[in-house]
Image (cartoon, helix red, strand yellow):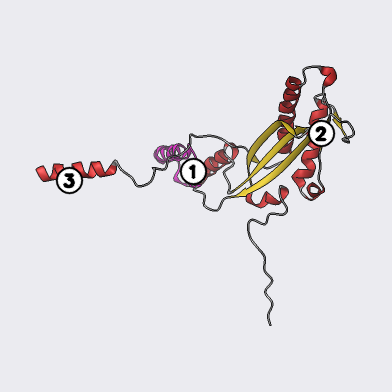
Amino acid sequence: MKYIWIATLVLLTSCAYRPIPLATSYPVTTQNKMQAVHHWDVLAANVADRLKTTIDLTFPDSTLKPPIFIRFTKDYEEIPFGKAFYRLLRTQLVQRGVNVVTSTEYSDTLLLDYDMQVVFHKDRRLTYPTPGIFTALGGGVWLMAEGAKRWDPSGLAALPALVAADAYALSERYMPGETNTEVLITTTVTTNDQYIFGYNEMYYINDGDYEQYDDHNNNGMQTFNVVDK
């Protein structure tokens, strides 16, 4: 018996030490998933609100508020988000009374830039079950058990498919699902080589939609032409 206690003590002591840190998860957070042009407009409205607040605080005198010029590069003409976000942000700023100009001829003009970076993840552990799925399935099992006592067996056959469909619809409505592709959208405003505003937003996007944000990134892959000699 003494040897069993010694072995247990040695085992417990050895478990208290690890050659590397123990992996832990971050607290549960949420991240929006962009799947529509409306979502781009929501981002533009959010940026416009934050930028107007910054301008009002930085330049409290209404007569001295400088105009804003949104820089738009030729590369953005080929990127759906780049082209649309320019128009959406311009409109949202104008609607808030911000002075948006079409040139930089004024010396005090604020320069607004935005950029998109698509990030591809190759080794993500996206295997967690949808919260509530086991409760829904458990409820379905209980209904079928009760139904077996009171209902006609022919009508009972449709219940499993209906419960599964409802559980799937519920998860898709409130949890659109994580993907292996994300986009980082950065908006900055500078004046005389000094940053006065910076804002970052991260979103999930569908894996097949990355070209809407970056048409130069080919998912880290190269295409080779095979020639038969």
Which image quarter: residue 140? top left
- Residue 56 horizontal side relative to residue 181, left or right: right
- Residue 160 horizontal side relative to residue 36, left or right: left
Return the mark for residue 188: none
Return the mark for residue 90: 2
Image mark count: 3
Tell me if mark 3 has few (under 14), some (14-19) or many (20+) residues whose alpha carbon lies within 10 angstroms of its own. few
Which image quarter: residue 139? top left
* The C terminus sits in image quarter: bottom right
Q: Is 209 inside the magenta-drawn segment? A: no
Q: Which segment did they paint magenta?
A: 126-155
Q: Residue at x 79, y 39 (%)?
A: 86
Tell me if mark 2 has few (under 14), some (14-19) or many (20+) residues whose alpha carbon lies within 10 angstroms of its own. many
Identify which amino acid the numbered label 2 is placed on: Arg
Identify which amino acid the numbered label 1 is placed on: Leu
Looking at the rendered image, the disc whose residue lies closer to the viewer, 1 or 3, is 3
Which image quarter: residue 108? top right
Identify which amino acid the numbered label 3 is placed on: Ala
Residue situated in front as seen by the camera: 140 or 91: 91
Q: Along the polypeptide, which appears first: circle 1 or circle 3?
A: 3
Looking at the rendered structure, the secondary structure element under dot 2 is helix
The residue carrying mark 3 is 7
Q: Residue at x 55, y 53 (%)?
A: 122
Q: Confirm whether residue 43 shows in the render.
A: yes
Return the mark for residue 159: 1
Looking at the rendered structure, the secondary structure element under dot 1 is helix
Distance Cα–Cα, label 1 vs label 3: 53 Å
Tell me if mark 1 has few (under 14), some (14-19) or many (20+) residues whose alpha carbon lies within 10 angstroms of its own. some
Looking at the rendered image, the disc whose residue lies closer to the viewer, 2 or 1, is 2
Residue situated in front as seen by the camera: 211 or 23: 23
Q: Is residue 73 above or below residue 66?
A: below
